[in-house]
Every structure is written in C-alpha cells, then in structure tokens.
Amino acid sequence: MPQDERQRSKSRASTSRAVARPPARAKVPLRKLLKVASVAGGIQFGWALQLSLLTPYVQELGIPHAWASIIWLCGPVSGLFVQPLVGHFSDRCTSRFGRRRPFIVCGAISIAVAVLLIGLSADIGWLLGDRGDFRPRAIAVFVFGFWILDVANNMTQGPCRALLADLTGKDHRRTRVANAYFSLFMAVGNILGYATGSFSAHEVPLGSRDQSAPCSEEGHEQSSDVHEAFLWELFGTFRYFSGTIWIILIVTALTWLGWFPFLLFDTDWMGREIYGGEPNEGQNYATGVRMGALGLMLNSVVLGITSVLMEKLCRKWGAGFIWGISNILMALCFLAMLILYYVAIHMDYRGHDLPPNGIVIAALIIFTILGGPLAITYSVPYALVSIRTESLGLGQGLSLGVLNLAIVIPQIVVSMGSGPWDQLFGGGNSPAFAVGGISALAGGLIAILAIPRSSAQKPRALP
C-alpha cells in the first residue's frame, strides 16, 4: 500500500475514534454540590435534638435505664431494610424529577411528621389517658414516631449521598469534597439541634400543672443488571467486592460499634455519672443532660471545622490513615471518660451537690474533641466506598446501601446488648463505653495497616 494511502487510512481511523468517543462530562460547580449537601443540615437538626434528649426522655416516660437502649432497636432494624431498598429503587427511578429527588422530598416530609410525633408524644399520651409516672400511650406514640424518623432519615440521606456521588462521577477529589460538604452541614444541623437541647431538657406534658404544679446530572449511567431484585441482589453484590472494600466495611462496623454507646448515652452519662442524678429525682440529672447537650454543641463546632479541613488532610496523609488516627483518638476519649467517672465517684459530692467545675470542664473538653473523629466518620467511609465501587457499575444508591449494613448491624448489637450489659456491671453507662473504646481502637489499627492509599479498585465487569 502506498505511503499516502496508509496515512489517509490512519487519519480516517483516528477520526472515527474521535467521533465514537463520548463527549467529556462537564464538572458540576462546587456551589451545586454545596446546595445538595445542605439537605443534611435540616435532617441533622431534628436528629441531633433527638440524640441529645431521647435516652433521658424515655426514662422520664417510665422506661427503666436497662431497657432504654431497646427503644433504639427500631431504628437499625428499619435501616437494615430501608436504605438498601431505597438505594436500589432510586438507582432505577425514571421520574421526570430525577432519580434521587422524589425520595429526598418524601423523606423530608416524613421527618417533619416524625419529629412532631416524638416532640408531642407526652401530650398525645395525656390526651389518650396517660396519668402518673408511667405513660404507656406516650411511649407507644414515641416509639412509632422514632421508627418513622429513622425510616425517613434513611430515605433522605441515602439518595442525597448517592446524588452527590452521581454529580462527582469519577473525580475522586470532588467525591471527597462533596462528602466533606455533607459532613459540614451535618455539623451545622448538630450545632442548632444540640443548642436547642442544651436550652431546655424538661418536658411538661398537658395537664401536668393541674396534677403537680429531572435532572440529567443525576446519572448518565445505570446499573448493568436491570432485572427486578431486592435484598438478594444486595447480598449478591458481595462477591464482586475486593479485599479493600471488605476492610472498609469491617472498619466501618467497628467504628460505629464504638460510636453508638456514646450517641445513645452521652447526655445520660453526663446526668448520671458526672452530675450523680437520676431521672425524675431532683434537678441534678436534668442539669447534667443540658450540660451534655452543650458539650455536643461544642462537639459539632469541631465537627464543622474538621469537615472544612477534611480534603487537605486526606490528600496529604491518605484517607485510610486519617480514619485510623481518628478512631484511635476516639478510643482515647472514651478511656478519658472512664477515668473521669472513676475520679468523680471518689469525690464527695454525688447525691447532694453539683460536680466541681474542673470535672464538668473536663467532660466538656472530651465531648468537644470527639467532634473531630465524628467528622471523619461522617465523611471518609462514604467517600472511600463511592470511589472504590464506582467501577463495578452497581449504582451509587445500592453501594451506599451496602455500607449502611455495616452501620446498622453494630447498632442492633449495641441496642440489644448495652442495657443488659451495663446493668450487669451496676447500671451505669461506663461498661458500654469501655466496649466502644476497644472497638474503636481495633478499627483504627486496621484502617492504618490495611487500607491502601491507592485511589480506586481495578474495574471488574458484572456478568
């Protein structure tokens, strides 16, 4: 073949490849990622208010401390099924409003209804006939509202994080930035919610005074497996995971096994162990709960600051290393809480006086420091899973549903076991914190030693 014909043939081939190559996808502006992530602020406001007051509140409704954690069981049980299913259906949604938005809107409305039910449960119980210290009707309304709240949170947060992953695509840096934005708005919601909780922690039900004084950016790709499937498809995806993804799931489970005792009993620990009070017995417990909510507000300030610095930290040191260090710091904080409780019980103030200022300040400092590890937990696992499962073609909704399993299973364990476990050692919260510290330390060491710094998993095609 003459040389000029070979050149024309190469030119035609290169032209055909250029025509076949899909156009580059324009980067989504950061301000749009910021707008999507802002959904977390409203969600977290109601959630933070409940986290700070729920355990004390259910005890004031008449539920014993040993069984207070069982109330939280409805949350992870619903989350075990809701987020994977919502992720599955949102991956395949064909609504003209987009794949994710219908679920986000429905979840937001459900959150508003649930928060109203929980906040007015004592009043509704009184209207239905509750009298005295034990209020079974209020408890029933409360449990129902809490169940709806957790379902709605999963219905909203899962698609919102999946939408962020859709918008960032294969840009790993923007994926980390988007999850840092999400964590930042969670901090804003936490600050507002915990500030409200610190203002007042006393519920006055009705009648008590009379008795006692379309969107193209949401996904240009669909899951390659389009057959109708539910939870069995979720579990079927496990066989495509690399060892690194399994390590991320294990570290996530250990991390949340450490966090849940704190999230369930933080303000209760302040009211019982530090202030030496009991629910419905004097003002020490209520004062401690309010002070605990103040500590959680300070915790959220640090959470927000850490979220802003997240991308720089992960880029310099690696996401796995930062995650591991944050878990070790969390374990040290739980150890400090145990030491502080040991010091408090050997001081002569519990039962008749408020704790010394030094004890309270030390507790507030511990709560504040924990904001850093919490910011890492809210962001890094989601970014790592999004980055390393993107090449598998599973759909971001389903991938985040898999991660949610590593969160809700430890929560079920803590909800079922922490109350009886604490009762076995005298009824306080410290035994659960000890287990949480050990779990956080184990997760931190695994994250540092086993999560590689490489950015993504090699593609593996689904059959």
Image: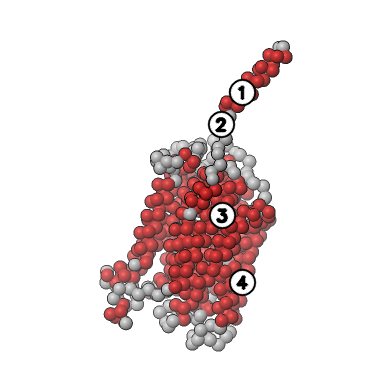
What residue sits right under mark 2 in the picture? 22
What residue sits right under mark 4 in the picture? 335
* Distance between mark 4 and mark 2 Cα atoms: 55 Å
Nearer to me, 238 or 404: 404
Give the structural element (helix, strand or loop) at label 3: helix
Q: Answer whether labels 3 and 2 touch (C-beta < 8 Å).
A: no
Reading the chain from its start, which is encountered first: label 2 or label 1? 1
**In the displayed structure, would residue 413 be above or below residue 450?**
below
User: What's under tag 3, amino acid-wise?
Assistant: Ala
Q: Answer whether labels 1 and 3 touch (C-beta < 8 Å).
A: no
* Distance between mark 3 and mark 4 Cα atoms: 28 Å
What residue sits right under mark 3 in the picture? 180
Reading the chain from its start, which is encountered first: label 1 or label 4? 1
Q: Which of the two marks, 3 or 4, is nearer to us in this view?
A: 3
Residue 15: numbered disc = 1
User: What's under tag 2, amino acid-wise?
Assistant: Pro
User: What's under tag 4, amino acid-wise?
Assistant: Leu
Across and down, in percent, residue 384 comes to 59, 50
